[in-house]
Amino acid sequence: MAWIPPLFIVIGTAAAAVLASLVFSSVREHNRVAGARSVVLLVLFLGVWFGAVALGVPEIILLLASAALIAFVALFFLPVGRAASIRVDEIQAQVDERDVIFAREDYAPGSPQYEAYYARHPDKKTMDDRMRDTPELLAPGGRFYDPVESRRIDSLFDVIRTLTTRVDGEIAAARIAPDPARLSADIQALTRRLGAADVGIARLNPMFVYSHVGRGPEQWGEPIRNDHRFAVAFTVEMDSGAVDTAPRLPITEESARQYLRGARISVALAAYIRALGYPARAHIAGSNYQIMLPPVAHDAGLGELGRMGYLISPRFGARIRLGAVTTDMPLVPDKPIAFGVQDFCKRCKKCATNCPPAAIPAGEKAQVRGTWKWPLHIERCLRFWRIIGTDCGLCMRVCPYSHPPTFAHNLIRAGIRRSAFARTVSVWGDDLIYGRNVARGFSP
Ligand code: SF4
Ligand code: SF4
């Protein structure tokens, strides 16, 4: 069977090329640990596989090894064990923005908001007072506070806050004739040209509109009236080099930079829709949201909600920020997507392992407002942010979906999308190459 050694060499060369692309990917990510480990893996593979031919290993062994590798690849890509997405449409209650942790941290003791809120929620008072005893985000006293860097980031958030006055405005009297398909394509193309990585349209679920104002310039406690029928949601990509610095200040600067980009896109997009004669309201960071962006972006087909609570995008994982404009312009909604995140998260748990204050559950999902999801301990998360003086982002950094969309990672994602086997193997592979405990030394 003279054909066996050549077949063995062809299969081995293809496998070595994939491993080499992993080395290339690690170099592109500037990840020394992953680079070194993938080089060792490649060298070991080359040594064993091609050494077997050089040492004259019996052909039957070469045949069996080839068959095992082919079976591995088939199992990795065959659509077996397809996983469903999270059912956010089962959510049956609105969230009051006054309950959101970013609103609660602003209630200064003695203020009318403080008195009113804790009279209604005495159970939260001790926990929130404890949080407020820690320094404010980016303020002196935080572990990574730096008088220059922290102020630079704060100045970016100040610019975002100035844009909160531009989120709504006059609607042109002359309305362009409705052509939902054409308008949808036009709006999506513009959003991309403005700098979005991805864009989608959702029918706005009223359950994702906050019930009452909790932050921002509007009257605290007022009911929020937003009955727009659609939301144009989009993602902006965060730089992977900056994300790899988590939980230090550069990731917070990157968050601020991308929030600013998202705010500009939203404001420009909303202004354009109003110029076409339809109501539109931008929702931007800096205490200006009327809607919950992650489930809206999920409905717009931009990704799935992961264990860590962020939206996981198929191309950039958790390494994104979200923006949205709500409108009554007639549009064609996109559909939610499922690419295996729920099942992968069930096996992975890397964000939970690496979250210093244990804010991400490592166990099973629980029922939250009618749907099954992993419930975050958001108070622990924010308290940790204030202790270190940054927005942490360790969970985003360690998430296997956050790797850049290189050839190697895209290949792995193609398997994860289809196969339960690929999901299990990829969790092991990610731990092997990138390490399991990345966040050692960042205890609260
Ligand atoms: S940002 Fe940090 S503290 Fe918050 S959930 Fe992620 S890892 Fe945990
Ligand atoms: S780190 Fe793992 S468990 Fe956490 S969100 Fe990412 S894929 Fe899911």
Image (spheres, helix red, strand yellow):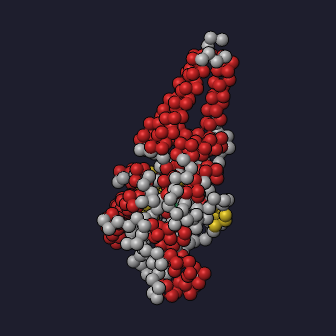
On screen, residue 363 above or below 377: above
On screen, residue 53 above or below 77: above
Q: Is residue 69 left or right of residue 30?
A: right
Residue drawn at point x = 52 percent, y = 63 percent: 443
Residue 71 falls in image quadrant = top right
Residue drawn at point x = 46 percent, y = 62 percent: 392
Q: Position of residue 404 (x, y in %)?
A: 45, 45
Q: Position of residue 345 (x, y in %)?
A: 61, 52
Residue drawn at point x = 51 percent, y = 39 percent: 37
On screen, residue 377 above or below 218: above
Q: Position of residue 88 (x, y in %)?
A: 60, 61
Residue 49 visible (yes or no): yes
Q: Position of residue 11 (x, y in %)?
A: 57, 24
Q: Nearer the viewer, residue 122 or 305?
A: 122
On screen, residue 243 above or below 62: below
Q: Is residue 155 left or right of residue 71?
A: left
Residue 295 visible (yes or no): no
